[in-house]
Image: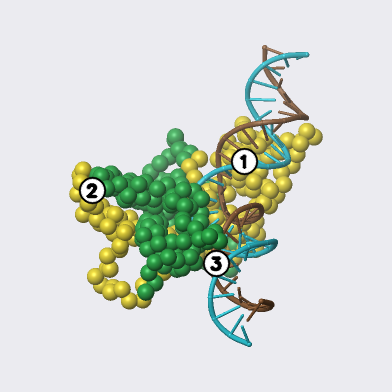
Chain colours: A green, B yellow, C brown, D cyan
Amino acid sequence: MTTGAMNIGDAARASGVSAKMIRYYEDTALIPPAARTAAGYRVYSDQDIHMLRFIRRARDLGFSVEGIRELLGLWRDRDRHSADVKRLALAHVAELRQKIRELEDMASTLETLAASCHGNDRPDCPILSELEAPAAPPTTPPHVRSGKRPGAVLKRKAG
Amino acid sequence: MTTGAMNIGDAARASGVSAKMIRYYEDTALIPPAARTAAGYRVYSDQDIHMLRFIRRARDLGFSVEGIRELLGLWRDRDRHSADVKRLALAHVAELRQKIRELEDMASTLETLAASCHGNDRPDCPILSELEAPAAPPTTPPHVRSGKRPGAVLKRKAG
DNA sequence: GCTGGGGCTTCCCACCATGGGAAGGTCAAG
DNA sequence: CTTGACCTTCCCATGGTGGGAAGCCCCAGC
């Protein structure tokens, strides 16, 4: 069996979290310092792998490292209230939905513009025209135009 | 009129791009070096503001700086083919839709889990259980589980 | 025993787009 | 001339992640 003490490389393979990131999580105290061999090698138990997998899953669900810090706190707390977990999860869902709305707005705007672009070898293109000077949306005469920017949430790398 | 030569602060206000970012765009050659006064102050013309606004809108549509570099190239090219602009735009739409799909998957998974969490003062919580040991989706017995990570696109800050 | 290759350690660098802030020069109004 | 708002450059931080160098460790094969 692949059971018991492993080096960081094995832990990475077993958990789906890269060795680099495991060290980073340790540095930033997301996870406790790993045990070490006499030579200084990090050693991971099955329990540790369990925790790393937890982290990996939470990342896959788009939680930030700070979010995971809170999740881990609740995970470890046997006296937690599931209400707290639920609140955390739903707050994250709200963030995700917000971001989705923003991206959807961008995509549909751009799609509309692209649909009206001939896409031939002539230079005239409503996409560029719109970027140059946005058409006032028909329902919203240029009145008290809000100057807001999208608002950050999330970017994830492939692994 | 607010027409003619402006300092970087005015240009920032007029374009919606912060002074910091204008300098950054210049450093990275996204825009040509601004003219300077004898004292070294950057000076911006209405043309420059026009370009900065173009950049700002492209950012608002989620284009990366590299994407904008391409857009600007086409914008300046009087012999461009609108097909190239359209291709760029649709490629970006595809990226956006891809990201939306990923976020939507996360959100709906999390929402489902949250719905089955009592959200009371007891500790048991299916959200944590799922993070601990993901339930095999009923339609997909644990066979050749793909080990993919989300895949990066986009993060935007509020301004 | 010695050697080679793969693994581990730490440390620094890069990405992307953005903001913060320090140290110092400039300009216009009072 | 002073004051305060503005400008300049330069460095640092963010969040996660990867790349890579320099140096140590461990095991298998000879």
Q: Where is residue A2 in the image (x, y as percent from the top left)?
A: 39, 72
Q: Position of residue A40 (x, y in %)?
A: 54, 59
Mark positioned earlier in the residue sequence (1 or 3): 1
* Horizontal side, residue A153 vs residue D30: left or right: left
What chain does mark 3 sit on?
A: B
> Viewer-nearest of labels 3 and 2?
2
Q: Where is residue A87 in the image (x, y as percent from the top left)?
A: 29, 45
Q: Residue at x 53, y 52 (%)?
A: B58
Q: Are discs 2 and 1 both within one chain?
A: yes
Q: Which residue is drawn at 71% across and 43% down?
A: B34
**Disc 1 and disc 3: Cα gap in Å?**
34 Å
Q: Which residue is drawn at 39% across and 59% down?
A: A48
Q: Are discs 3 and 2 both within one chain?
A: yes
Residue C4 vertical position relative to residue B120 in the rendered view, above or below: below
Q: Which residue is drawn at 45% across and 66% down?
A: A6
Q: What residue type is labelled 1?
A: Lys
**Disc 3 and disc 2: Cα gap in Å?**
58 Å
Q: For numbered disc 3, what is the local secondary structure?
A: helix
Q: What residue type is labelled 2?
A: Pro
Q: How crowded is mark 1: few (under 14 residues within 10 Å), some or many (20 or more)?
A: few
Task: Confirm whether residue A94 shows in the render.
Answer: no
Q: Do the residues labelled 3 and 2 touch (CB within 8 Å)?
A: no
| Residue denoted by label 2 | B123
> Viewer-nearest of labels 1 and 3?
1
> Viewer-nearest of labels 2 and 1?
2
* Horizontal side, residue A139 vs residue B56: left or right: left
* Horizontal side, residue A39 vs residue C25: left or right: left
